[in-house]
Image (cartoon, rainbow, N blue to C red):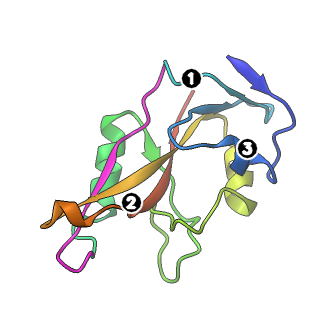
Amino acid sequence: MKKLENVTEETLDKVMEFDHVIRVHADGTVSDGYHDRFNSPELVMDVDEDGQDVSGDDELRRQAKAYGWELITGFSGQQSYSGPVMHSSEYVGGGLARHILETPGYWVITSVECTGPDPDAYEEPAGWAIAYREE
């Protein structure tokens, strides 16, 4: 595993790439090179004809748990939403970055794909989520 130098709240977003597992150590340092050890969870949201979520956040949590991960909630800046799906305009910074760097364990960003009545209509993911697993 490779220790990453100078990872801070301001630089964590650049370190956390999709499906790239990192480890936060008890002293707040970060290392990577865990892609052979852990698979990023594959998350799929069921949507209706209008593109609205019909499966719910509990289904996404179940999918993540099947891979051994827990989805992090409460950090989205979307109005009236505190679930695990982040909007494409959001990033890993501020309170979210602080929480990650203060919580030892493995972390990964994964996309939340869509499926529904017209599978060809979903070229873009619904958003993204952050998954965590204890050391």
Q: Is residue 64 magenta?
A: no
Q: Which residue appears at 30% of the width and 45% of the height?
A: 63
Q: Secondary structure at mark 3?
A: helix
Spatial CA distance of label 3 from label 2 is 27 Å
Spatial CA distance of label 2 from label 1 is 24 Å
Callout 3–callout 1 Cβ contact below 8 Å: no
Disc 2: which residue: 125
- The label on residue 13 is none
Q: Position of residue 34 (x, y in %)?
A: 56, 23
Dominant secondary-structure state across the stretch colored magenta:
loop
Q: Which residues are magenta?
A: 37-51
Q: Residues within 10 Å of mark 2 (few under 14, many from 20)?
A: some
Q: Position of residue 13 (x, y in %)?
A: 70, 50
The quarter of the picture where the C terminus appears is top right
Q: Position of residue 80 (x, y in %)?
A: 48, 82
Give the amino acid at mark 3. Answer: Leu
Q: Which residue appears at 79% of the width and 48% of the height?
A: 11
The quarter of the picture where the N terminus appears is top right
Task: Please determine whether, in this image, residue 38 is positioned above or below residue 59.
Answer: above
Callout 3–callout 2 Cβ contact below 8 Å: no
On the question of residue 87 being in view, the answer is yes
| Circle 2 or circle 1, nearest the eye | 2
Name the N-terminal-most of marks 3 and 1. 1
Spatial CA distance of label 3 from label 1 is 17 Å
Give the amino acid at mark 2. Answer: Pro
Name the N-terminal-most of marks 3 and 2. 3
Can you name the residue that lies furthest to the right here?
6
Disc 1: which residue: 34
On the question of residue 102 being in view, the answer is no
Task: Please determine whether, in this image, residue 29 is positioned above or below residue 76.
Answer: above
Disc 3: which residue: 101
